Image: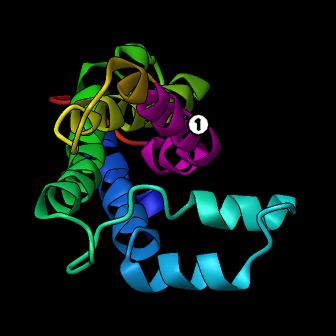
Amino acid sequence: MALTNRYKSAPGAGTLAALLLVLVFGSPWYADWARDNTDPDSAGGWFLRLLAWPAWRFDSSDSIQEIFAADLKAILVVVLTFVFLYLLPGSQLARARGTLSQFFAGWAAYIFAGAFAALLTALIRTDPTLLGAFQAAGDGAEYGIFTGWIIGIATLGGYRGRR
């Protein structure tokens, strides 16, 4: 089982979990299902819709610039998750694998990845504004806060670099 493998790396496991989250819950099929079948005024419906935040899509009536920005955001969430997992010292400085520092480093990496991915892609959208970029970064951080615990769990028990 992946969570008990003592040879997994924390950045690799967290990135794989982020990739699965974005591929499954960011898919057009899931996003359409969540929009059509959940109540945005209930906690469960709100969370199921939040999972679809880094939505990617193949076609749409939007401009090519908007589609590219949405797809780039989904890609950047995964890539920046790896970057921040590698750079955050919590899992690197932990004396024992599986400590809470690894969990919180994974969670924080996903918060940062969501915020920075949204900030960067908001600047390439049609008619970008600084306020729109800040609001998008807030949406990305909100996504990371409420879903980043999954990445935190995935990083538990992983090693950091060479032994």
Which of the 4 image quarters holds residue 132? top left
Q: Please state the horizontal and vertical placement of residue 77, each as a whole percent of the image.
A: 30, 45
Is residue 38 depicted above or below 150 in this figure?
below
Residue 139 in sight in this render = yes
> Seen in the image, is 34 located left or right of residue 47?
left
Residue furthest to the front: 127
Residue at figure coordinates x 46%, y 38% from the top left: 140
Q: Please state the horizontal and vertical placement of residue 72, each as a whole percent of the image.
A: 18, 52
Residue at figure coordinates x 54%, y 44% from the top left: 143
Quarter placement of the C terminus:
top left
Is residue 51 depicted above or below 24 in this figure?
above
Q: Provide the residue designation for mark 1.
A: 142
> Seen in the image, is 33 located left or right of residue 69?
right
Residue 140 magenta-highlighted: yes
Which of the 4 image quarters holds residue 1? bottom left
Residue flagged by tag 1: what amino acid is it? Glu
Which of the 4 image quarters holds residue 99? top right
Q: Secondary structure at mark 1?
A: helix
Instruction: Write the start and end of the magenta stretch as one range.
Output: 135-157
> Seen in the image, is 70 located left or right of residue 139?
left
